[in-house]
Structures are given as structure tokens and as C-alpha cells.
Amino acid sequence: MDTSQHTLHTLFDQLGLPSDEGAIDGFLEHHTLAPETRLDQADFWSAGQAQFIREALEEDSDWSEIVDQLDTLLRG
């Protein structure tokens, strides 16, 4: 079992995205979600990224809390 604490930085690493502070801020500035769009269905994810997000939420994995945080940030 993975017991490491997940952060936005490690989530972006897991998704294969640049994970430095500036890159994360830039991503959040340029991507938003409509209220009716599920996070895993956003058009800016690759198929693999969408699958990871969907599985994290469906399986309530140790990634689910930080994935939920990302969802909130993309709607703010």
C-alpha cells in the first residue's frame, strides 16, 4: 500500500504533466470545468489521464482526495 502523502505536485507528476508551482498555476488558469462536466470527462485529458482520474475516484484510492481538490480548483 502506498502511504506517501499526495499533493498537487505529485498528482501532476502522476498525470505526466509539469509539476512545478508555475506550471500548476498556469494549468489552473487555462483550464476550467463547466458545472455539468465530470473531471474525468474534461477534453484536456489524454485517455490515460482520464482513466487514472476515473479509477482514483471510483475506487476511492489514496489519490481520490487530491483528485477531488483538483476538481474544485478547476471549477473555482
Image (tube, rainbow, N blue to C red):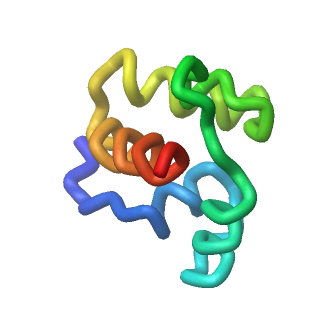
Quadrant housing the N terminus: top left
Above or below, 63 relative to 61? below
Where is residue 14 shown, x and y percent of the image?
56, 53
Determine the residue positioned at 59% across, 26% down: 40
Quarter of the image for residue 44 reads: top right
Quarter of the image for residue 39 reads: top right
Determine the residue positioned at 76% across, 27% down: 47
**27 lies left or right of 3:** right
Where is residue 62 shown, x and y percent of the image?
27, 40
Q: Which of 69 and 36 is in front in this view?
A: 36
Where is residue 15 shown, x and y percent of the image?
63, 50
Q: How many marks?
A: 0
Determine the residue positioned at 61% across, 37% down: 33
Quarter of the image for residue 13 reads: bottom right
Above or below, 20 relative to 15? below
**64 lies left or right of 40:** left
Determine the residue positioned at 69% across, 56% down: 16
**25 lies left or right of 4:** right
Where is residue 57 shown, x and y percent of the image?
38, 25
